[in-house]
Amino acid sequence: MNQKIEEAILFLKQCYLQRDPKNIDELMNLIYEKDHPNILIGTSLGEICANEADWRDLFLSDWEYWGNLRIDENKKIVTEFGDQTLVSLHAQIEFVFTEDENQYLRYLETMKNIQKDESKTNYQKACKMEWMLCHLLSSRDEKKRTHVLDIRIDLIFQNDKVRLMAFYFPQSIDKAEAYVGEDDFIDEGYHTEIQNMVANPFPFLNDLIRDSFAQKGYPEATVHAAEFNHLFYGVGIIPLNHDLSSRLEKAFSDNIDSTLSTKDKLYHLRRDIAYTFKQYSVGEHPQNYVRFYGVFHLEDSVLVIDHLQPMFPWTWILEDK
């Protein structure tokens, strides 16, 4: 990895520490090449940015609204794919949660909005309310608490510029939270991303991506991919191959038999039960939305996938998720 890439990563780290909008021009000059396809993927559905204005908006929004993000460049993993360099960064994002009247009022307003959603059954509404409230209404010693989440930032460089960048939380499908039919804005984000993707000139790429998902333990994935410069990105749907009873049994055993303190066992048990009910409120067979990116090469005119990274989008930042 050359010095220019090192400098770009260090300045990216500095930007997220300082959260100063004045840094945006220098950051874009370092990592973004105009008049060239470049993709930035955020943590939520609807956050696939394919132009400079959207890249800028996402960075500025992060610096204004996100918690404190700290990149540990000492834990980076560097992988070379021909003339492309994948740098995977380990980072943590810190959020401060408070329990006071203003916070309760914000949650109450959210409960009202859920209640008014005529497209959902009362059972679905109740499951979502319970899942959100069980993260808030807990007996705690402190009314203001800091919660730290692990996050990954992957960057693929070519000619010292970022061709593809992705933010994602490293969770498994069992903890994913964006489901088909759960929220209109989630469903709309998924379809918007498909509509905005550039044309895919390789008709067999989707088949190869499905095969790669199957090798990772997701044999029934539906995918929609776009390609540029031997990189690909896209969205898809993966069914959850567990019934409600087995998922609840896992929640029981994972927490009751854990090494957590007695109080934490009870707290996590309640949280996981609420999450499971929310998960299955959409139907007997929930389907997860997934995003992904990857790298491929041509070998004797045959497509070969070198790397595939699934990413499960988030919709809510809640304490101790």
Image (cartoon, helix red, strand yellow):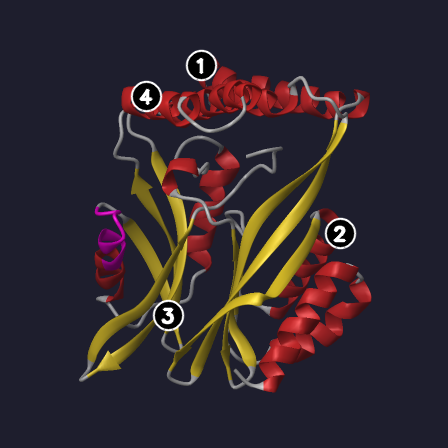
Q: Is residue 243 left or right of residue 181?
A: left
Residue at the disc numbered 4: 249
Q: Is residue 1 above or below residue 293?
A: below
Q: In the rendered image, which quarter contains the C terminus? A: top right
Residue at the disc numbered 1: 123
The residue that appears at 72% across and 47% down in the rendered structure is 65
Give the percent coordinates (x, y) of residue 14.
Answer: 73, 67
Q: Secondary structure at mark 4?
A: helix
Query: Crowdedness of circle 3 by 10 Å Cα count: few (<14), some, many (20+)?
Result: many
Task: Single out the mark in the foreground, 3 or 4.
Answer: 4
Callout 4 amino acid: Glu
Query: From mark 4 to mark 2, how far is it between C-alphas?
Result: 41 Å
Residue at the disc numbered 3: 227
Magenta region = 212-219
Q: Secondary structure at mark 2?
A: helix
Q: Secondary structure at mark 3?
A: strand
Asked if residue 236 lies in the magenta stretch, the reply is no
Callout 3 amino acid: Glu
The residue that appears at 59% across and 57% down in the rendered structure is 91
Query: From mark 2 to mark 3, how far is it between C-alphas?
Result: 32 Å
Task: Single out the mark in the foreground, 1 or 2.
Answer: 2
- State the mark number for residue 64: 2
Callout 1 amino acid: Tyr
Q: Is residue 204 left or right of residue 128?
A: left
Query: From mark 3 to mark 1, how far is it between C-alphas?
Result: 41 Å
In terms of image quadrants, where is residue 81? bottom left
Q: Is residue 232 above or below residue 146?
A: below
